Amino acid sequence: MRYVSTRGGAAPTRLSDAIAAGIAPDGGLYVPERMPTVSLPFRQGDLAGTALRMLEPFFAGDPLEDELPAICAEAFAHPTPRRQLPVHGAHVLELFHGPTAAFKDFGARFLAACLSRLRRDNDRPLTILVATSGDTGAAVGAAFHHLPGVRVAILYPDNRVSPRQAHQLGSFGGNVRALRVEGSFDDCQHLVKAALGDPALQSDVPMSSANSISLGRLLPQMAYFGHASLEADEAMHTIVPTGNLGNAVAALWARAIGLPIGDVMFACNANDTLPEFFGGQPYRARDAVATIANAMDVGAPSNFERLCHLFGGEGAARRGGHAESVDDAEIRDVIRRHASNDGEIFCPHTATAVRVFERHRHAGDRRAWTIAATAHPAKFDTVVEPLIGRTVAVPEALGAMLSRRAAAEPMAADGRMFAEWLRGW
């Protein structure tokens, strides 16, 4: 299996090289040269077994191929229960039982397991860059903390993540450093892409990415959607809270290789780049708007390139997808109402998907839907607890992280200054 750039300007390469590089030389994102297919049924009991079967074709012929069973065992060590909600026809897929209480744990641990097994030509450390709107950075920090030969720079928008997210991001130390950027998530993402695309900087500071632009992050995210779909009685229609589009594209890739996944809807917050596009308007990236579902505050979703590549162009992508916006007032209403009526407590991101489900149910859609629950509500206590009138129990792993000292360094949204910082590390 070889991998090519979404922009068509880079030579095909091996998976290991694509993972190590993070981004293609032409600035595009790596995708399979052809999408493989898998035969059903093949459920292997646990999530790690299903992941192995799903990902084997993507690793075919790669130096990491023989390591894939061990990589899957390391990355998929936490459960992803799919359970019925009190509303008939609604299930929730809980993806937040990892060490940082967010779905990003699976992809980050998978990427770390891959990179730790790749041989490098020199003794200089590999610097992992990660832009985060809240959850990705903590997952990557936890996965790479104390990993020899690797260091991590986490960039997050100052004052635009929850207090507990900010504490997580700065709680590692050692080989993981957090930078609070004066700007939005899109500014952080631009700094990362610019650094990765600078040959002179790459020569001085070998770098890779841990955002969903990395194949090593996106490929494993296919696994929990595929695993859950094999539990459903029929094709699993899915609603995915969506910011940078990585998780939603992973669900679509799982469907493309043959898993029984039906429609995939994208639930967005007030950042309506994708809802406008799927509503028929030309794609237009814009500055991100701050919302209470901050991990989805993205105005220029990177994986839009992969979405269009999968469908064969913007026109086909528009016909093949669906996205809706949910504003802060609706998010608050969902959290308050469900906590009061049925005892379900959702994080603000999961609440966007619940609201999209409710809209379609009220419009007469009686199909069963599975809602991806992307983070534990305890990470957003300052939003959730005032709405429900009680405290949210903190998962043990999250509590341990919050008990550590945290620190982050200020950084302007300036590529030159960031490059100087990287060279001086």
Image (cartoon, rainbow, N blue to C red):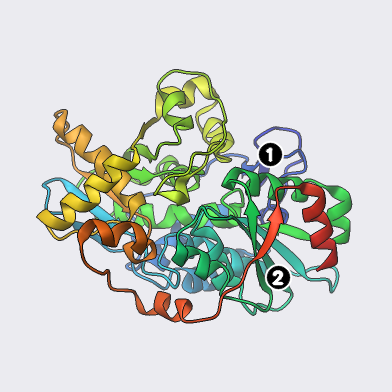
Q: Is residue 135 left or right of residue 83?
A: right
Percent coordinates x, y for residue 306 in the rendering: 56, 37
Mark pair 1, 2: CA separation = 24 Å
Q: Secondary structure at mark 2?
A: strand
In the rendered image of this protein, does residue 334 appear above or below residue 106? above
Q: What residue did someone put label 2 on? A: 151
Q: Is residue 235 visible?
A: no
Q: Residue at x 70, y 79 (%)?
A: 148
Residue 208 quadrant? bottom right
Percent coordinates x, y for residue 170 in the rendering: 58, 70
Residues under numbered marks 1 and 2 in contact, where contact means CB atoms less than 8 Å apart:
no
Residue type pointed to by label 1? Gly
Q: What residue did someone put label 1 on? A: 28
Percent coordinates x, y for residue 354 in the rendering: 25, 45
Q: Is residue 27 visible?
A: yes
Observer-nearest residue: 61 or 164?
Answer: 164
